[in-house]
Amino acid sequence: MTTSLYAHRAPDTIARAEDWRDDALCRRTAKVDKEGFFPIGVGLVALAATEQAKGFCGLCPVRMACAQWALSQGLEHGIWGGLDEIQRRRLRRKHTAGELADPKRLEDIVTAEWKARAENALVEAYLTRTAQDEDGHVRWLTKGGVTVHGRKLTPAQLAFEVGYGRHPQGVVKAQCSRKTCVAAEHLIDDRIR
């Protein structure tokens, strides 16, 4: 009896090793806007998109692996594992290559960075109480101001601190056509005037 050389066929697919990306929430969720992980610009719209992407990453079961991979690969753009490009650059400057190559040390570094973000109550207070209008203005959605870490702030003061990274000096006023606008780029204080 003769046997054909073609009697045994190779499988149609070749199994590949498991990869952390297979379990990434952004990859498994069809409704997520992948471009949302690559915000453009530095204004409050980009800040809101960045915070939204980081919040999504906070739900992901593989965010630590994602953050570690992005740091080890030197990725310069986008949100990876809940870290934006500024955070990753800062971590690469602050820590030695040896620290970033050590998995346990890197896990501690990334965890500390996530904790610092979670403590940024000013950004959280701003993002949960404002809405971006299509014309570039930002509306305050609640009545009155807000208290953050025991400090009472008006909507304009809060927006100014989030946008400029410093306490305002004197009165904060909108310099755009909408006097109630709380877009940081539309606000000025006495120091700017």
Image: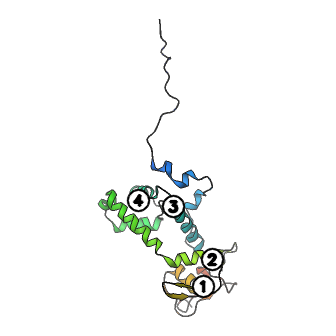
Q: Nearer the viewer, residue 48 or 117?
A: 117
Percent from the top left, x then y, of residue 118?
47, 72
* Secondary structure at numbered mark 2: strand
Q: Are marks 1 and 2 in contact (CB under 8 Å)?
A: yes
Quadrant placement of the C terminus: bottom right
Residue 104 visible in rendering:
yes
In the picture, the disc for residue 71 is 4
Tell me the residue that label 3 is attached to. 57
**How many angstroms separate mark 3 from mark 1 (CA)?**
28 Å
Tell me the residue that label 1 is attached to. 155
Which label's residue is closer to the chain start, 3 or 2?
A: 3
Q: Nearer the viewer, residue 44 or 118?
A: 118
Q: Nearer the viewer, mark 4 or mark 2?
A: 2
> Amino acid under label 2?
Thr
Q: Nearer the viewer, residue 88 or 12?
A: 12
> Amino acid under label 4?
Leu
Which label's residue is closer to the chain start, 4 or 3?
A: 3
Left or right of 31 in this view: 117: left
Quarter of image, res 107: bottom left
For the residue carrying disc 4, how many other residues have a C-alpha within 10 Å: few (<14), some (14-19), or many (20+)? many
For the residue carrying disc 1, how many other residues have a C-alpha within 10 Å: few (<14), some (14-19), or many (20+)? many
**How many angstroms separate mark 4 from mark 3 (CA)?**
15 Å
For the residue carrying disc 3, how many other residues have a C-alpha within 10 Å: few (<14), some (14-19), or many (20+)? many
Residue 78 visible in rendering:
no
